[in-house]
Image (cartoon, coloured by chain):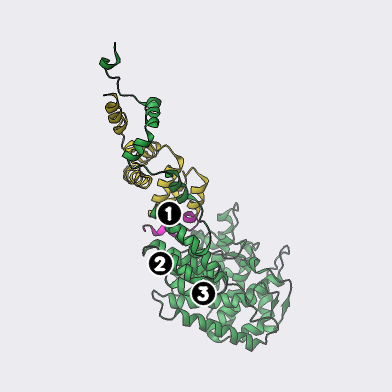
Chain colours: A yellow, B green
């Protein structure tokens, strides 16, 4: 009984059904990061606040930066906004590859 | 109460759950298909490009997140071009989907080839750079290193012939390029080839420019003026009010200026961005250092004045007042050029209204226009400063 309740608890992330934590439940790291990206991408289209809230639900700064970078690369038009908040040195270096090329920020899209 | 009939505890959260999960970690890993080394995939995606050559290309392909493999391929292409490995550069660009990033990839590869003076490869990549092809040609041209083909010892006619031939080579490479790139690219390279033949060399003899065919005259005079102004008016000395006339006279008299040469990386100066005056849309122009343009004179004499005015601006300390006397010239292109350069020469912190009073109150609306347009001149400390349009 205890074991089954525990399993249910773990699967539902203890009643907090934030979608951010739904991504946390995915075991495969690539699928997990893809899940975070898709959620963050939708939030980004809604509002800055929604996007920041989505990022706040991600525990690791590397994963938060990964989301920011992937969005910046997909749409260099918004790279400056995203890169402004990257947290890790590695991500800052990657951002320089986009921000150092002003024409990219006018071109947009993949 | 015996444990077996005790009420079940409420769903536990926090550390309690964590510790329980930890105890069953191997079970969960199997159940959820957990992969080990999950941190590695993220770290690998954020890490700098590993290795060199084909190994680096392989590393890009192994990045788990496609988006992050994109800048990796671009970087590999640029590095490969910098190391003169075009096969690898092309393989890296080809790995990208057609669009912004594959265009950027060819742009970067073109730039890197250009730094080596490899025109075939650099122009080939630039022409594959799509929307960025124009930027690519501009960057390649203005970063093209000087060659030793034309020196102060080369007879003028022979030197001019070599520069003509090099320009023709560029024309051939750009032949058939669409979207006006053929003509624009040709003009940019003409300007650069002549720039390299004069500027920073420490020698300025008008004989070489005089040997240029008519269609290359403006580029040749422009380059002669840049080096003559640099050698005749060294930094720290106050420019004479008749600086333009002094250089016009030197041209007429065939005076050869000699002085210190500059390291190739220091052959730079103050430059103007393209200034899109609607009054000058139909005036013939040639590209100048930094991505801007200068008007071409109606005749050699007028063109020489225009070239010298631009050369004085290139000396980074020339004040706005230096150009004021030319605002009243009877030749409209001279007036407009003087107004543009005067506007660009107003230093940060100076009173723009006061400095440009003569421009603002001018009878010619095409002169007045330059008081309204506020350019942001560039001052390259190293080679390659260009305003992207």
Crowd band around label 1 with a 10 angstrom C-alpha radius: few (<14), some (14–19), many (20+): many
Q: Which residue is mark 2?
A: B94
**Residue at screen point 59% across, 80% down:** B220
**Residue at screen point 65% across, 69% down:** B264
- B168 and B326: which is toward the camera: B168
Q: Report, in whole angstroms, how far the alpha carbon at label 1 lies from the one at label 2.
A: 16 Å
Q: Which residue is mark 3?
A: B188
Mark 1 secondary-structure assignment: loop
Mark 2 secondary-structure assignment: helix
Crowd band around label 3 with a 10 angstrom C-alpha radius: few (<14), some (14–19), many (20+): many
Q: Which residue is mark 1?
A: B63
Magenta stretch: residue B127 in it? Answer: no
Do marks 3 and 1 share a chain?
Answer: yes
Residue stretch rendered in magenta on the structure: A97-110
User: Which numbered mark, 3 or 2, is in the foreground of this view?
Assistant: 2
- B286 and B367: which is toward the camera: B286
Q: Is residue B377 above or below residue B218?
A: above
Q: Position of residue B105 (x, y in %)?
A: 45, 64
Crowd band around label 2 with a 10 angstrom C-alpha radius: few (<14), some (14–19), many (20+): some
User: Which numbered mark, 1 or 2, is in the foreground of this view?
Assistant: 1
């Amino acid at each position: 009984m205890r074991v089954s309740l525990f399993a249910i608890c773990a699967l539902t992330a203890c009643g907090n059904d934030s979608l951010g934590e739904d991504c946390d439940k995915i075991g495969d790291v690539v699928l997990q990061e893809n899940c975070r990206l898709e959620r963050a991408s939708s939030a980004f289209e809604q509002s800055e606040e929604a996007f920041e809230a989505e990022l706040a639900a991600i525990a690791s700064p590397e994963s938060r930066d990964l989301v920011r970078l992937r969005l910046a690369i997909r749409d260099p038009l918004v790279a400056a906004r995203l890169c402004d908040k990257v947290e890790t040195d590695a991500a800052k270096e990657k951002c320089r590859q986009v921000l150092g090329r002003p024409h990219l920020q006018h071109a947009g899209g993949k | 109460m015996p444990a077996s009939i005790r009420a079940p505890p409420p769903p536990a959260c926090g550390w309690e759950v964590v510790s329980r999960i930890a105890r069953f970690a191997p079970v969960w890993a199997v159940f959820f298909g957990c992969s080990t080394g999950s941190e590695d995939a993220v770290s690998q995606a954020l890490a700098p490009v590993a290795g060199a050559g084909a190994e680096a290309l392989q590393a890009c392909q192994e990045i788990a997140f496609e988006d992050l493999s994109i800048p990796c391929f671009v970087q590999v292409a640029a590095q490969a071009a910098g190391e003169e490995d075009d096969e690898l550069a092309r393989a890296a660009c080809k790995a990208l989907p057609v669009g912004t990033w594959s265009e950027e990839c060819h742009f970067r590869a073109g730039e890197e080839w250009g730094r080596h003076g490899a025109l075939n490869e650099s122009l080939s990549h630039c022409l594959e750079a799509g929307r960025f092809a124009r930027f690519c040609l501009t960057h390649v041209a203005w970063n093209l290193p000087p060659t030793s083909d034309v020196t102060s010892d080369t007879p003028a006619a022979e030197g001019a012939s070599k520069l003509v031939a090099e320009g023709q080579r560029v024309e051939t490479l750009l032949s058939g390029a669409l979207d006006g790139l053929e003509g624009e690219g040709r003009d940019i390279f003409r300007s650069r080839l002549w720039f390299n033949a004069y500027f920073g060399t420490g020698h300025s003899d008008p004989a070489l420019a005089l040997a240029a065919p008519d269609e290359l005259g403006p580029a040749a005079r422009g380059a002669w003026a840049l080096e003559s102004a640099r050698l005749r008016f060294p930094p720290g000395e106050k420019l004479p009010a008749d600086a333009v006339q002094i250089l016009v006279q030197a041209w007429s008299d065939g005076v050869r200026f000699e002085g210190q040469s500059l390291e190739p990386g220091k052959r730079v100066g103050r430059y103007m961005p393209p200034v899109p005056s609607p009054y000058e849309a139909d005036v013939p122009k040639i590209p100048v250092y930094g991505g801007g343009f200068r008007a071409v004179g109606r005749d050699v004499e007028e063109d020489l004045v225009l070239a010298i005015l631009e050369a004085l601006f290139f000396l980074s300390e020339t004040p706005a007042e230096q150009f004021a006397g030319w605002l009243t010239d009877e030749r409209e292109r001279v007036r407009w050029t003087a107004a543009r350069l005067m506007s660009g020469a107003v230093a940060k912190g100076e009173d723009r209204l006061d400095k440009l009073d003569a421009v603002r109150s001018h009878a010619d609306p095409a002169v007045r226009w330059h008081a309204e347009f506020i350019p942001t001149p560039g001052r390259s400390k190293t080679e390659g400063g260009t305003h992207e349009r």
